Amino acid sequence: MKKPTTIFMGSKPGAVVALSILLDRGWDVKYVVISKTITHPWIGGKTLEQLAKEKNITVTTQEKLPKKIKVDFVISYMFRHRVSQYVICQAKRAALNFHAAPLPQFGGWAFYNLAILENAKEYGCTCHYMDNNFDTGPILKVRRFKINASSETALSLERKAQEEMILLFIDFCKIAEKNKKLPVKKQNKSKMRYMTLKELEKLKKIPKSTDLETIDRYSRAFWYPPYPGAYVKIGKNKIEIIPTVSKDEIAKLLHRDDLEYLLKFYQSQKDKS
């Protein structure tokens, strides 16, 4: 059976893995669309652009994407911009977005953060149809999993969600390859919630006269280096609060090579004598 054609849009490591999945499954990826304005230089490893070029796939930006091409699917996977209507219309079967949170409860930007602040019992990721707004289109599928919000940071919850989203992406590929009608479920408008980037930044301020448990929860909810975290305001100064659990993680990373470093230093001194 002939595999689907697609325009693939994305960023971050999850998108690199998703593109690898498509290629492993024999999909015909016509274009890979990246952002030139939003980059993540602190993330190591191969980029989406590098993988696409290795596989001889044309890499472009949304603005330069040809307008007359038609494909089975337009796929947005961690793409950091609104997908234009003319791009959505290039999909013959569906234009889909992979969102690293369960919809309709966690639309927009602050999904990891709110899940921790609100002590959510479960989390998830969503594949939904794209429309003219952010995160409002009908749902194809949601994967949910249990979490213990009292021990999560935004960083640790993102890692779990990204793993689940890869599994969701594989689920989608299997559904799409059957060439049957895709699942469609309208979002419950009464449960829809969307958090803007500006609202996310406002949330980072820890309330005054709060207890230590709340301070810890805020610090974990916004711990995602290198972005600014939760803070208290003293005069005109913002003092960021680092969660204890993350201090331990950082210490392990910083000191994991101590023995190797000292052994190499010792060896260099032996060689000189």
Image (cartoon, rainbow, N blue to C red):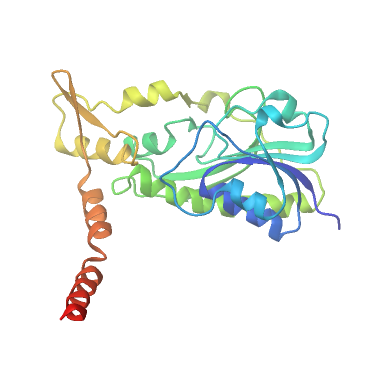
What percent of the width, then of the height, locates residue 72?
Answer: 80, 41
Visible residue check, residue 168: no
Q: Quadrant of the C terminus?
A: bottom left
Quarter of the view holding residue 123: top left
Quarter of the view holding residue 104: top right
Taking 149 as reference, is 50 left or right?
Answer: right
User: Height in image: 198 above or below 54?
Assistant: above
Q: Residue at x 58, y 36 (%)?
A: 79
Is 116 in front, or is 237?
Answer: 237
Which residue, as the protein is rendered here, is positioned at the far front?
272
Is 23 in front, or is 267?
Answer: 267
Taking 255 as reference, is 119 left or right?
Answer: right
Visible residue check, residue 219: yes
What percent of the width, then of the height, locates residue 157?
Answer: 40, 47
What percent of the width, then of the height, locates residue 187?
Answer: 61, 30
Q: Residue at x 70, y 29 (%)?
A: 64
Is 32 in front, or is 88?
Answer: 32
User: Height in image: 31 above or below 266?
Assistant: above
Q: Residue at x 25, y 38 (%)?
A: 219
Taking 148 as reference, is 1 left or right?
Answer: right
